[in-house]
Image (cartoon, rainbow, N blue to C red):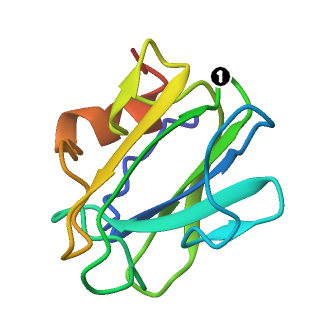
Amino acid sequence: MKVPKTKEIEIAAIRLTVPVRDDDETAEDFPGRKGNQVTLVVGVDDGVIQAWPSGLEAEETWKACDSGVYELIDPAGAVVKTIEDYVPDFIPNSYGDYVELKVSGKGVWEGWKSSIRELKNVFTGDME
């Protein structure tokens, strides 16, 4: 008989890659933008975006719908889980369709709300 074994892992960051659509007003030189997508790496505990330019404040909304990719990253930088679906609850969003980004000059994503419960839901498949 085999039974499932629970393994505890540490999540240090979340890397999200979302599309930039033609009707978005995202500047070509927006941090993390390459072509028609933006990739950001965000600290789970503090909501700080890695490599964010000091002093830059930004506010963007991207219509990701089910086209976003969200990766949970361990402290060594390895991807431990990839989600390719609607915007998960641990990312500030509207209706699971729109990523809502508001960043302070210190690179902190305002409204960042990752929590143990929400991240556990990702692993158990109970995403809301």
Q: Viewed as shown, does residue 74 lie left or right of 18?
A: left
Decide which of 39, 117 is in the foreground and name it.
39
Numbered disc 1: secondary structure: loop
Dot 1 corresponds to which residue? 65
Decide which of 126, 19 is in the foreground and name it.
19
Determine crowd level at label 1: few under 14, some 14-19, many 20+ residues with C-alpha closer than 10 A: some
Q: Viewed as shown, does residue 82 lie left or right of 23?
A: left
> Please, is residue 55 above or below residue 7 in the view?
below
Q: Viewed as shown, does residue 98 lie left or right of 43?
A: right
Disc 1 residue type?
Answer: Cys
Decide which of 56, 47 is in the foreground and name it.
56
> Please, is residue 19 above or below residue 16 in the view?
above
Coordinates of residue 14 in the picture (x, y in percent): 44, 60
Q: Residue at x 29, y 65 (%)?
A: 57
Q: Residue at x 31, y 68 (%)?
A: 10
Image quarter (top left, top right, bottom left or bottom right) of the C terminus:
top left
Coordinates of residue 24 in the picture (x, y in percent): 66, 37
Coordinates of residue 29 in the picture (x, y in percent): 64, 73
Q: Viewed as shown, does residue 74 lie left or right of 48?
A: right
Q: Residue at x 52, y 65 (%)?
A: 40
